[in-house]
Amino acid sequence: MSTSGLSSGGAGSSELRNKLPNLSFRGATSDEESRTAAWALWRAQIRAILRLELRKTLFARRGVWIYLLAFAPFVLFAGHSFYDLKTGQVADIGEDTHVFAAVFQFFFLRLSIFFGCVGIFMNLFRGEVLEKSLHYYFLAPVRRSVLVAGKFLSGFIAAGLIFGTSTVLQFLALYWQFDSTVRQEYFYHGHGLNHLAVYLGVALLACLGYGSVFLAAGVLFRNPLIPTLVVLIWEAISGFLPTLLQNFSVIFYLKSLCPVSVPPDISLDRGNPLALIAVNPTPASVITAVLGLMMLSIAVLIFSSLKVRHMEIDYGTE
Amino acid sequence: MSAPEPGTRPQGRIIFEDVSKFYGEVLGVNRVHLSIPPGITSLVGPNGSGKTTLMNLMTGLVRPTNGYISVLGMAPDEPEQLFRAVGYCTQFDSFPRGLTGYQFVYSYLRLFGYPHARARELAAAAIERVGLTDAAERKIAAYSKGMRQRIKLAQAICHNPSVLVLDEPLNGLDPLIRAETIALFRTLAADGLHVIISSHVLHEVDVISDQVVLLSNGYVVAEGKIQGVRDEIQEHPMQILIRCDKPGALASQVFKDDCVVEVRIHTDRQGVLVKTRDADRFYLLLNHIAQDGINIESVAPADDDVLSVYEYLIGTEESTK
């Protein structure tokens, strides 16, 4: 610890104030310059938020469970490939493609990414309130909407990195057991790379959709369990809801985008009496699904910004 | 520090106009009218009197239920402008996880949009000002209470604000650092800053403040320069301690005047403690007495400090909480 005293001399306030950069865009001479200066400032502020948030999200010890959840399918597929190679079993690439589709839709999207986004995005505001550190941002000259954008972007990048990497690794692990000629044929001349790209896109869109929903939930609710359960149940029953209501679920759009449908013989619906009342609407087109998810996310983020704009720091009631 | 007339809000002041804040049904502050000039202003009151609420209101961390607040002409709900001019050292003793002292201040400056080199320079200067340079690269989690207090102070002053809001800033500081911190506040106030300090340690406030705002149960009970506030308390006679060589003779002479309500020989028998309802008249009387052969060494008010004023206004019980 420093034993040196406080310096009441040194560079005086007025002297230092003169060195401040002209970050304010109020003094700009034209609207165009104002806008340019404002965007430059917001970009710089979002970069600063990203630096702080990514470190917290990606390297926090409390986030280890998110990695476990994200990489569990990779471990499963790697184990499966390793077992087949060891035992000399001949795998069927078509069958494995369907297995991948089933694991991706029923485990990865509905559990890994869903709960991973709960862990990442719900903590962006709620976690800071519980740790009593949100005032750090609220005491900076940052527009609250910029703060929401920066925090969401950091959550999206972190979730995208984790679940995107997992998607690629799962894909590679599953097809690793095949002979190199079969692999090359499937990846470069078949649907392999195309499917990988689509699954990656779906994983990222899932992070976008669930991320925005859980960021808003973290702003609105004190207890994260309630919104998590509500969204989980809504997503689970969406298949039994009228077609119109299915449009308001994230999983509807994600399923529509998946390149491979899960065949009935490995679908969870098989033998399930509820399958009789399941409604199978026409899948949304790619444009509708992508735009639908983006619009949902933007709407939820605008709503979150408005709530954060009026948010007060009152840790005492937590 | 009087309430401004509507439409005549001075731009260089911090203004509260009829401000109330309720947390549900719990009163935070009620019907506050203030106009705070530059210099050191202390918010004084026991825990729960509304000091932190007033500070949170002027920095936009909470919104008023009623009323209008302006900080140098800016509304507190516009953080993008407000916090370029305001630094707030809160009472919250929590920090973003995993940061060193330097990273804490540096990252805060990056949120302003400062480029790396400038943020680095300002962070280093602020940390040096609070005497934490040697500990800057250590994690805040390993800091002592006093060091955490000082790094928060560095965060509040790092962007050279015009208004510095400090919630119990001397808590946890050892006497040496405390004295140096007070000197820093004085320098900042001399530079023309508004320095708003909250404290429940009344003798500390006495040393620091240019003006005080006395709070009790969410109400402003008095405000202004401490001597001015004391002068307005009519029901408690002013206490004056006179050091002299003949306390017995002095006591018998001053007691003849009806402006004096009580005279006591000081316990060390080196002076007289006088209670008077008219201090100006008493000082004139004392001039006459001094010419009658009593050697008067010193004359000093004995109860125009914040503690006495607070006790008179609020009561002994609360002031010692």
Image (cartoon, rainbow, N blue to C red):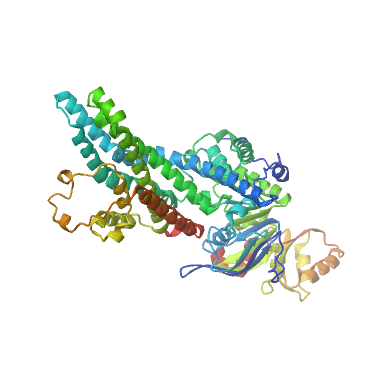
Give the residue drawn at x 44%, y 53%. Answer: A298
Q: Give the residue furthest to the right.
A: B291
- Quadrant assignment for the C terminus of chain A: bottom left
Q: Give the residue furthest to the bottom.
A: B258
Asked whether residue B151 is in view, the answer is no
Q: Nearer the viewer, residue B65 or A295?
A: A295
Residue A247 lies, in percent from the top left, at 32, 57
Residue A135 lies, in percent from the top left, at 51, 51
Q: Is residue B193 left or right of residue B116?
A: right
Q: Give the residue furthest to the left.
A: A271
Residue A214 lies, in percent from the top left, at 38, 52
Question: In the rendered image, which quarter is residue B67 located in?
Answer: bottom right
Asked whether residue A67 is in view, the answer is yes
Q: Nearer the viewer, residue A291 or B259?
A: A291
Question: In the rendered image, which quarter is residue A91 located in?
Answer: top left
Give the residue drawn at x 24%, y 38%. Answer: A100
Give the residue drawn at x 26%, y 56%. Answer: A238
| Vertical position of residue A211 compared to residue B18: above or below | above
- Quadrant assignment for the N terminus of chain A: top right
The number of discs equals 0
Q: Is residue B139 left or right of residue A79?
A: right
Residue A277 lies, in percent from the top left, at 18, 59
| Vertical position of residue A187 compared to residue B119: above or below | above
| Vertical position of residue B150 compared to residue B244: above or below | above
